[in-house]
Image (tube, helix red, strand yellow):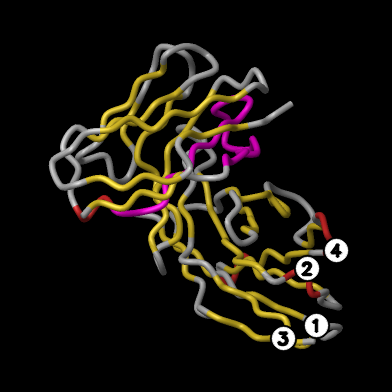
Amino acid sequence: NAGVTQTPKFQVLKTGQSMTLQCAQDMNHNSMYWYRQDPGMGLRLIYYSASEGTTDKGEVPNGYNVSRLNKREFSLRLESAAPSQTSVYFCASSRTGNGQETQYFGPGTRLLVL
Amino acid sequence: AQSVTQPDIHITVSEGASLELRCNYSYGATPYLFWYVQSPGQGLQLLLKYFSGDTLVQGIKGFEAEFKRSQSSFNLRKPSVHWSDAAEYFCAVGPKAAGNKLTFGGGTRVLVKP
């Protein structure tokens, strides 16, 4: 099993450009999450999907959209990138949306917006 | 709103010495509590978690954590540190209801001296 995979690993964008971060899991998990990691702030939840067909906002959703394409895939889209969105983005998944479930993380996508 | 504080941004410890990482949380009720570790360039991996019962929980890689309700703390400990323990450690809390939405602390980076 590959676990949680993310593409690309690294991306440079200019202000105003758009891009989609891809995430896939092969663990048959129902719930998936997108976080951003900034120095000294830990990880902050952007969006999550408790189950296929549902998505909901997290702590910092502004400037982002998500699509739960199917059970395996959960993408994050930046429509008009801003320098404030320079960050490392992590996708995670868990078997269910129950608070006791362990979240499994991908290796991250490092995004630089100039 | 819930919050998680990790007071130590950096800790340097000698190999073989003991390690304690502090975590304090602010929450309406006792949440689920987690410790994750992030090795350089990697995603996060769960070390241990606490839901209820025995307040001393054992995790992987020889780590343990103690929940103290009176202090709203969930400190992580390891009796003897190995060079491979150099990483960033994150404390996280999650609600007992309303989904698996974690709030992370800012992280503690651990450096291990030979």
- A107 above or below B18? above
- SS category of the residue bearing label 1: loop
Are the residues under badges 2 and 1 in a single subunit? yes
- Marks 3/4: CA distance? 16 Å
Mark number, residue B18: 1
**Residue B23 position in % (x across, y down):** 57, 70
Closer to the eye: label 2 or 4:
2
- Marks 1/4: CA distance? 11 Å
- A4 above or below B85? above
Q: Give the mark nearest the N terminus, 2 or 4.
A: 4
Binning the other alpha carbons within 10 Å of mark 1 as few (below 14), some (14 to 19) or many (20 upward) gives few
Based on the picture, tell me whether residue A95 belongs to the magenta stretch: yes
Q: Give the mark nearest the N terminus, 3 or 2.
A: 3
- The residue pinned by badge 4 equals B62
Q: Tell me the magenta residue range.
A: A86-106
Are the residues under badges 3 and 1 in a single subunit? yes
Three-letter code for the amino acid on which mark 3 is drawn? Val
- The residue pinned by badge 2 equals B84
Q: Give the mark nearest the N terminus, 1 or 4.
A: 1
Three-letter code for the amino acid on which mark 4 is drawn? Gly
Question: Of B75 and B67, which appears nearest the observer?
Answer: B75
Are the residues under badges 1 and 4 in a single subunit? yes
- Which chain does the numbered disc 3 sit on? B
